[in-house]
Amino acid sequence: MSKNFGLSRAAMIVTLGIILVLLSVYVPMLGILALAIPVPYAIIGTLFERKYAFLSLIITFFVVMFTVDPIYSTSTCIMSIIPGLIIGNLAKHNINNENSNKFEPIYGGTIAFVICTIAFYVFAQVIFKINIIDEFTNLISSSFNDQVKMMQEMNIDLYKNINMEDFLILAKNMIPTMLFLKGLIAAFITYYLEVFMLKRTKMLNLAKPTFKDFYLPGNAVGTSFALYLIVLLLGFMNIGLYTDSIMFNLQMVFNFMFIVQGIAVSIYYIKKWLKQGTGKNILVSGLLIGIFGTMGISLIGMLDSIIDFRRVRSYKST
C-alpha cells in the first residue's frame, strides 16, 4: 500500500505536523492544536513504510529544535510524535484483518502515551536536569495560593479548612491515574481524527470503532485481580514501594475502565430494545442504574468482561 504514496506526499504530511507544532507554540489562542500534533504522524504510520516514519521523526525534531528550543522539540517527539506513529502502525495491521479488535490502536496508543510520558520525565531529569513532578506540584501550589487570595478578598472562609500539604500529597498520589486518563483521551482523539482525515481526503477508509462495541482487551477482571494480589504481596514484603498509592491508582483506573465498558453495554442494549419496541426493559434498566449509580454501571462492565453479553469477542477479539 505504501508504494502508492511517494516521498512528496509524506513530506506534505510532515510539513502539516510541523505547522501544528509551531502554531500551538507561537499562537497562544491555538494552543489546543497541540492535541492534534500526533495525527499527521499517525497517518504516516498507517500509509507509509517505517523508514518514512523514522525520517518524519528526525526531520520534525531538528526543525522544532531550531525554531523553538531543544527541550520542546524533545518533549514533542517523545510525547506526541512517537505515540502517533505507534497508533498509525497499529491501525495498519487492522486494515486487512476483519476479525481484529478495532480498538487495538486506542489500547496500544494509550500505553504508548503513558510510557512515552514516563520516558520523557526520566530523560528530562537526567539530560535537562528538570524535575517535571516538582514543576507540576509548584504549578498546583501556585494555583492553590491564587485561589486562596481570591477567597480572602471575597471574605470566604472555606480555605481555612484546607490543608495545602494534604492536597499536594493527594495530587501526587493521583499522578499515575492522571497519566492513564491523559493517554486514553489522547489516543481516542488521535485515532478518531486520523480516521476522519483519511476519509475526508479519500486516502484510505479505516474502520472507526463504535462506542457500543467497546470492550477491554484480554481478561480485564483476571488481570486486575492478579495486579491487586501482586501489590498486596509487595506490601507484605516491605520493600519500600508506596503500595497504598499503587492500589489506589489501580482501583481508580480499573473502575473507570469498567464504567466505560458498562456504559457501552447500556448503549448497546438501549439501541437494541428501541428497535424491538420494548420500552419496559429500558425503564427497568434505567431505574436500576439510577439506584446503583456508577457502582452498578461498573459492575455491568465487569460482568461483561467475563460473560460477554454482546458477543463482540467472538468475531472481533484479537
Image: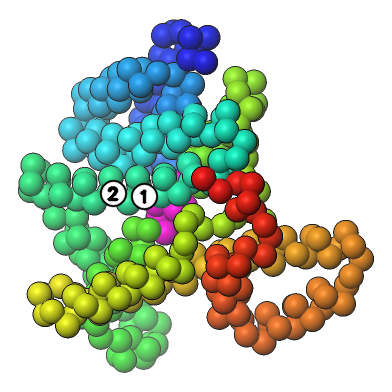
Left or right, 121 with reference to 59 = left
Q: Quadrant of residue 264?
A: bottom right
- Is 310 located above or below residue 195 in the figure? below
- Is 91 located above or below residue 269 in the figure? above
Prevailing SS of the magenta stretch: helix
Disc 2 crowd rating (10 Å Cα; few below 14, some 14-19, many 20+) is: some
Q: Which mark is residue 30?
A: none
Left or right, 137 with reference to 282 = left
Q: Which residue is at 60% across, 46% downward?
A: 316
> Which of 44/66 is in front?
44
Q: Which residue is at 27% across, 38% downward?
A: 78
Residue 277 image point, x, y percent: 92, 66
> Which of 117/169 is in front?
117
Magenta segment includes 185: yes
Left or right, 67 with reference to 206 = left
Q: Residues at badges 2 and 1 in contact (C-beta under 8 Å)? A: yes
Q: Quadrant of residue 141?
A: bottom left
Q: Label 1 is placed on what type of residue? A: Ile
Look at the numbered disc 1 and give the secondary structure of its residue: helix
Q: What residue is pinned by disc 2?
A: 115
Q: What residue is pinned by disc 1?
A: 111
**The residue stretch that appears in magenta:** 181-187
Q: Which residue is at 39% across, 32% downward?
A: 85
The answer to whether residue 245 shows anywhere in this view is no
Residue 314 image point, x, y percent: 63, 51
Q: Which residue is at 32% across, 17% downward?
A: 51
The answer to whether residue 185 shows anywhere in this view is yes
